[in-house]
Amino acid sequence: MCLILLAWQAHPEYRLVLAANRDEFHARPAAALGWWPDEPEILGGRDLQAGGTWLAAARSGRLATVTNYREDLAPQPGVRSRGELVTRFLKGSDSALRFAGALDGDDYAGFSLLAVELGASASEALVYVSNRGDPARALTPGLYGLSNASLDTPWPKVLRSKARLASLLEAGVDADALLALLADREPGSSEDIADAIADDLPRETARAIAAPFVVTPEYGTRCSTVVLASASGEVDMCERRFDAAGTPTGESHVRFALS
C-alpha cells in the first residue's frame, strides 16, 4: 500500500506540494534519493530489482509518481514493471496528457499514475490515469489523495490525511510538517480494516495497512518523500527512510532549480 497527497496550484508560495509514503517489502532492494549516475537529469529513489522508481523528478520540471492497485489477482507473468512508467515520462518529450493517454494499460498490472509538468504557468499540468478504468485527464487546482485505488477513493486514511494537509496549507507548510503528517500510525477505522479483510488480507495486516504509515515485520513504509515546488522555479525534495520497525535509518535532502 502507498499514500500520495498533493496540493496542486493551491498555495500562494508553492505550485506543487506533494507528500508520499512508499510501502514495499523490506527485502526488496532500493537506492536512496539522489541524482542517478546513468541518468544525471533524474532525481529520485530507485528500485534496484526492476530498475524503475516510484517517484522522481527531472531538471526539466517533469515529475511523476505511481502506485499499484489493491486487487485480488494472481501474479501476472510477463507484465512490465510499473516503475518504468515514471522513468519513461521523465525522459520523454510528450506532454503529460499525451503520454498518459497513449499508455497501453494491458502491459502492466494495476496502477495509478500522476504526471506533472512544471514551468510557465500556461503550460503547467497535473495529469492522472489508471489502467483500472480511469482514462487520462488533467486535474484542476486543488487537493488530491491517492492510495491503491482510484484517485480520491474515500478510504479513511486518505480522507484523514487530506484534511491534515489542508490544515497545514492554512497554518504554514514545510518539509518537517509534511513528514510529521506522513508519520501517522493511527490504526484505521473498523470500516477500513473490514474493507482490507474483504481482500483476503489477515486481520493484523489489514489493521496495519489502514494507517497512513505502515509497520509490519515483512512489509511497510520504506520511505516518506516530500516535494515542494516553489513559484520561483525551485524544487525541494526530502526523503526519510525507515527499517522494518519503522525507525528512521537515513534522510536525503536535495534542492535544484528548474532548467
Image: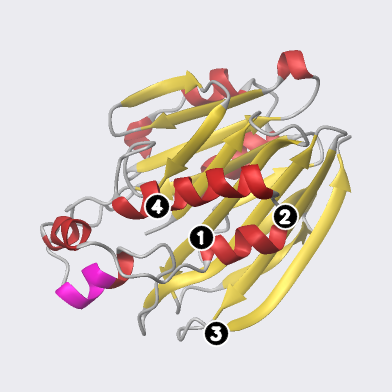
Task: Name the residue beneath numbered marker 1.
Answer: 21
Instruction: Give the spatial CA distance, label 3 vs label 4.
Output: 23 Å
**Which element type, helix, strand or loop, lies under badge 2?**
loop
Q: Earlier in the sequence, mark 1 or mark 4?
A: 1
Looking at the picture, how far across and down is residue 235, in whole percent?
Answer: 80, 45
Task: Name the residue beneath numbered marker 3.
Answer: 247
**Image quarter of residue 200:** bottom left
Amino acid type of the residue that numbered disc 2 sits on in the rendered structure = Asp
Q: Earlier in the sequence, mark 2 or mark 3?
A: 2
**Does 103 sit above or below residue 67?**
above
Task: Name the residue beneath numbered marker 4.
Answer: 160
Looking at the picture, how far across and down is residue 77, in whole percent?
Answer: 28, 53
**Does 190 sit above or below residue 55?**
below
Contact between labelled residues 2 and 1, with CB atoms less than 8 Å apart:
no
**Does 169 sit above or below residue 175?**
above
Instruction: Give the spatial CA distance, label 4 vs label 2.
Output: 19 Å
Residue located at (58% from left, 70% from top): 30
Q: Earlier in the sequence, mark 1 or mark 2?
A: 1
